[in-house]
Amino acid sequence: MQSVDGPRRSEALESLATEGVDHETAMLIDTADGPVLIYAMQTDNRNRSLSVADASDRPTDAEHRAVIRAADDGPADARILLDLYVNAP
């Protein structure tokens, strides 16, 4: 994933634009139970964005899907602590 924020950044930004994603971020947190991947994206239409990404034949999108699927162990037990919008969606 780090190459996406480096030499492949323009390719990744093109994918985001095609998917209608305004912002994407990922972080890895080490915990006593093992690492936790935190991934978030901002878009006006989540279903459309996911559909476009899943159908993409771009190499960067295929690699992204593989990494996310390999790391995905299902939804985590979590609760939203803060969710503010200047202009509510």
Image: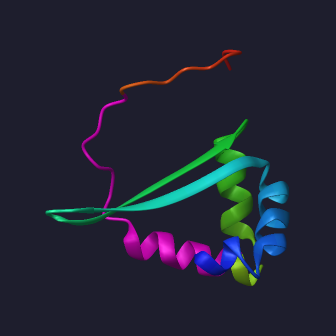
In magenta, the rendered stretch is: 61-80
At x 37%, y 29%, the residue is: 80
| Quarter the C terminus occupies | top right
Report x, y in % for residue 24.
64, 53
At x 33%, y 50%, the residue is: 75
Relative to residue 77, is residue 61 depicted above or below? below
Report x, y in % for residue 11.
82, 74
Report x, y in % for residue 48.
72, 48
At x 80%, y 63%, the residue is: 13
Asked which quadrant contains residue 74, the reply is bottom left
| Quarter the N terminus occupies | bottom right
The extreme left residue here reads: 32
Relative to residue 54, is residue 40 depicted above or below? above
Q: 20 and 30: which one is in front?
A: 30
Q: 4 and 46: which one is in front?
A: 4
Q: 46 and 5: which one is in front?
A: 5
At x 24%, y 43%, the residue is: 77
Q: Is residue 54 left or right of residue 39?
A: right
Q: Is residue 1 magenta?
A: no
Q: Is residue 30 left or right of residue 59?
A: left
Q: Is residue 32 left or right of residue 66?
A: left
